[in-house]
Every structure is written in C-alpha cells, then in structure tokens.
Amino acid sequence: MKIHSSTGLHGCVTVPGDKSVSHRSVMLGALADGVTHVTGFLMGEDCLSTIDCFRKMGVAIEVGVDHDVTVHGVGLHGLREPSERLYTGNSGTTTRLISGILAGQAFPVSLTGDASIEKRPMGRVITPLRQMGADITGVDDKFCPLSIRPSRLHGIEYTLPVASAQLKSAILLAGLYADGPTTVIEPAPSRDHTERMLRQLGCRVEAEGCRITVYPPEKLTASDVAVPADISSAAFFLVAGAIVPNSEVTIRSVGVNPTRDGVIEVLQNMGADITLFNRRDDGEPVCDVTVRSSRLHGVEIGGALIPRLIDELPVLAVAAAFAEGETIIRDAAELKVKESNRILAMVTELTRAGADVTETADGMIIRGGKPLRGASFETYNDHRIAMSMAVCALACAGESEIQNDAVVAISYPDFFDTLRQLGGEPV
C-alpha cells in the first residue's frame, strides 16, 4: 500500500466496534441462558476466531448484515467437547480468556493459535488457573499449545503481577465455575469490560479500588449488547487529525470507558485540539469526538496510565515524533510481548523515517520536531504497527509504502477505506 503526504483530512467517520467488547459478547453470550443479540460487532479476524471456537463447542452463532451477531446461549454447563483442537488465530484475548472458561468444563480440550500466539507468554495464565485447581499444561508451562482437562475449581485471592485485563478476565471467568468467590487484585486499573458485562448478565461482581471479586452464579441471563466504536481504532484517526495540517475529523460513537480513554488524555496533554460531545451510556460510556490539527509538544507517559492506553502506544509514538520536544514512554515493557515487540518495531520504523528515537528497557525516548520523510515501512505482521506507520506516512514528506498492509484485517478490515473517506488517498 502506497501513501502520499496529506494536505488535510476532513470528514465524519465511524470506526469498527470495540474488539474487547465484541470478544466478550460472544463468550458470555454463549454461557448465558437465552439469546444474545449483538449490534456493532467487530468483524475482524480476531473476533471471528472467538466465534469459531464457540461454534466448535456446540454454540449456534449467526452472523448477519450490518455487523449484527446472534448468540444462542447454552448456559454455564452447556458447552460440548470439540472434535478438534481449538484454533485462536492471532488473538491473545481469545486464547487467554477462553482458557479461564475451559478450565471449568467437564471435557478435555486443547487450543493454540498462529506462530505469534505460540510465542506469547501464557505462563501468567497457567499459574493462577492451577492455583484454582485447573489441570492445564503448555509447552514449557509457558506457551501454546495448551491442554486443559476436567477438574474442580476453587475460589482464590490472586494478586496480578502486571495490570492485564486478559489475565484478570481469565481468572474471573474461571471463577464462574469455582466453589466460592474469586478475588483478583490489580497493581493498576485495567479495562473492566468483563466486569461490566458479567453484571449485565446478572452475575454478582464487586469492585473496591483495584480489588475485584466475582461470585459464582447459578446462571447467566442473556442480555443484548450494543458494541461501541473501538477507541483503539479511533486512536489512529485522532492522531492523524492532530498531526496532519489543515485537518478536522469527527469520529462517531466512540467508547470512552474510563479504563480505556488514556489516549485522549495524553493527546490533550500534548496540546491536541480534541472535543468530546453527545455523551451517552448503553452499558458502556460513549461519545462523539472531533479532532483538529494542532501543534503538539512532548510529554511523559507512564505509571498507572499505561494500562489505559497500552494498545495505543504505537500510534502515540507517531504523535510524539511530530511533537516539539521530548516524549518519554516508560513502564511499558508489556509492549515487547504483544503481536510483535512493539517497542523495537516502532523505534526501528520511526528511525527509518528520520525520527530521533531511542529504545529503553521499558519504552522509548522520542525527540520530536524533526521533519520526517517517507519510507518503506515494515509491519512485523502486526496490525497496530501497520496502521501506526500508515498514520505516520500521512505526515511524512513524499511517498511511503506499507509492507503486508493486509494485516490490518485482524482488527480493522476497512482501515484504508476509512483513510480514503477522509482524503488520505492510499493506493
């Protein structure tokens, strides 16, 4: 995909549905009694992997037009043993969350994903599930494929080693099958979509600060789910609108869950002209967002803010490259074990464009303000690196090329179409 420097982005767009909420709508809808109607579902490859896994366990799931999905729940104990190994594709969310659910089933199962998933750390899930009594093993007890056999689970209190919504959710979902309450203690708040949806389906979930407790329910009751637009997808156009001169972009119905909206806070702290309006709540807080081009300045990003924007850090690094002064990203070592090593990837690719970037043990230092030039950018088979470098290309001088651009289909199949709608003109 070739992208030329843009003279301005303009328009009003809707980005795809939230990936985290889409995953959970299928998982919890499958475990509920009754039918769950999902609107705004993200038809990306990761979420389709979740649908495929539950279909293989006997759940009828209909995919309709206009991003509607209908899940015919089988109840907490209605899943059936699959006839083959479950395949989770590139989806860490599917792999980790479904492990918690499978730990409580009455049948054996194995699961794995693509080459990237087989390199991503699963020991952090295996350890607490074993403490709950799960019979789960993996390669070197750290990696997929995972094998899970029937066992009796009991409630535990577990302190997370890192603030991770995937890890927290795996434990809470296993807690649905435990013999008593399960408590997770986070070092910092992470996205709370699992807790919100469990409550929506009638499960007792208590949260006090970073201490979350789930009480095993007799059943979950189906409830319709309206998936908001994904703030992680919106982030690419928030940054593009801020760094491309003469731009004004509005994004409709963006999910602004307070555990996920760190990207807006950081961009505003950098001086971005961002307006939030038309706020409402439909299970998740939502609003419309307008961004206008502006002069950005460097900031420091770290601490408790990191879990609120971990997926947006690659594109925030792009914003920092076009900002005046120094931006420091720290406490983000988790980026090394995503779909790629996103620290190394962003340092390498921004340097390719002429940016002054230094890798650190847990992040990077970006000295912004230098004019950047177009280049041929690698994507590392990582959808967020691909989209981040496409945004960078819009503000670079000359022409850029995005290698393996098709990888965006993992989370945003129509990304380049949206870019064209705003006048980005990728070819």
Image: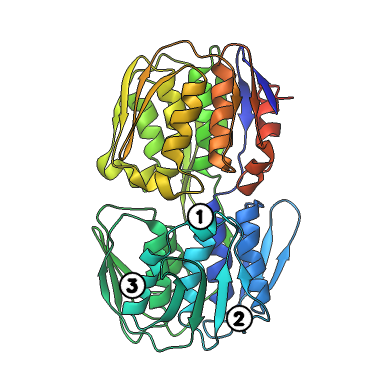
Residue that mark 3 sits on: 128
Measure how far apart labels 1 and 2 are at the Cα level.
22 Å
The amino acid type found where label 2 is placed reads: Val
Which dot, 1 or 2, sits closer to the camera?
1
The amino acid type found where label 1 is placed reads: Ser
Q: Position of residue 365 (x, y in %)?
A: 33, 27
Residue that mark 2 sits on: 74
Report the residue at 39% width, 28% height from top: 267
* In this view, 80 is above or below 85: below
The amino acid type found where label 3 is placed reads: Pro
Residue that mark 1 sits on: 20
Q: Quadrant of the C terminus?
A: top right
Q: Secondary structure at mark 3?
A: helix
* In this view, 334 is above or below 69: above
Left or right: residue 170 versus residue 422 is left
Q: Position of residue 407 (x, y in %)?
A: 64, 43
CB under 8 Å between callouts 2 and 3? no
* In this view, 290 is above or below 95: above
CB under 8 Å between callouts 3 and 1? no
Measure how far apart labels 2 and 3 are at the Cα level.
26 Å
Which dot, 3 or 1, sits closer to the camera?
3
Report the residue at 46% width, 22% height from top: 351
